[in-house]
Image (cartoon, grey):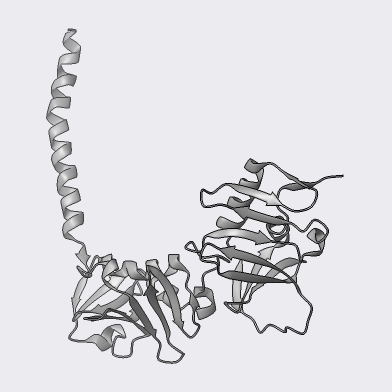
Amino acid sequence: MNKRWLPIIILILVIAPLAWVSLSFKNQEIEDSSYEISNLKLSEFDEIFIDFPSKAATSFKKINGYWYQTKPYQTRADQNIVYRLLSILAAKSKEKLESLQIEKYGLDKPKLKMTFSNENQKEVFSFGTYNPVTEQQYVLYDNNVYILDGIFSEMASYLPVELIDKKPLAPFEKVMKFDFSRLEQWQENYLRVEIDDMGKIKADGKKIDFDEMQLAEWFTENWLKAVSTSVEPYKFDARIGYKSFDVYLDDKAKITFYRIQESPELLLFRKDEGLLYHFPQDVGFTMLNPNVSRQD
């Protein structure tokens, strides 16, 4: 070996262990400087209550593994937002302060309170003012004050209508058939799309041709993955002759959607939920027009 490499090798052998020790110590310092807010588990709770001092409360309840908004609306909840709210149970804080002077942190008159509950317990988190330096928020839980990212209270402060599930169909609603025959573009063909128990899909109607792969892609992309841009409660006027179509589920239930508007966006009213779903015009067109062709 060339002698000029020997000092370099020795230097590497000396520095490498020191670097490893330094990094390990640094990681240990980071771990030691973080405080777990709680040892609670997300799966332990089936109700969430969000209370504000100056506006109506919002609440959620988990039923058969799915979260629903119970106040002020009674409908499916946006699952992602609910689980983000629950994630505060596993949050960590860089500081843990005594709660002897809660007024110092605005916790004597909290901006909001989040309560997680089940049959046997209730855990309350109170949100105070923001730290002017870190721009994080003071949170009181179990007689301790922590500093957390303000995203938790921001999400909790969303308007209740923003907390409604934007999917027109819930994941547990297994579609077996679409009946588009009442829509004017399909009245002549009496178009129906059917999915069997094995997931095989076909189009049925008069003078209709289809490609199974293309039809399956239409169903997956435009219905199974469908998410509206917004959703809202809607007072439906049955006196107006809106065109409609039906979706049949595996439990024999029937969901009727009314096409309230096509342009500049598609508005679909789901009758059983009393909700109006908004979709971009191009997305809406594809939802109501499966990949089928008409025979000459």
Spot the residue most to the right: 296
The residue positioned 77% from the left and 64% from the top of the image is 183
Which sits in the foreground, 231 or 152?
Answer: 231
Give the image quarter of residue 7: top left
Spot the residue most to the top: 1
71 relative to 24, above or below? below
Query: Where residue 121 sits in the image (x, y, percent)?
Result: 22, 81
Which sits in the foreground, 57 or 23?
Answer: 57
Query: Where residue 6 sits in the image (x, y, percent)?
Result: 15, 15
280 relative to 23, above or below? below
Residue 228 in view: no
Q: How many marks?
A: 0
The residue positioned 21% from the left and 87% from the top of the image is 101
Query: Where residue 32 sits in the image (x, y, percent)?
Result: 16, 58
Query: Where residue 99 sits in the image (x, y, percent)?
Result: 19, 83
Residue 63 in view: yes
The residue positioned 13% from the left and 26% from the top of the image is 13
Q: Please identify the quadrant where the N terminus is shown.
A: top left
Q: Please identify the quadrant where the C terminus is shown.
A: top right
Instruction: Classify residue 219 as left or right of residue 260.
Output: left
Instruction: Classify residue 250 as left or right of residue 125.
Output: right
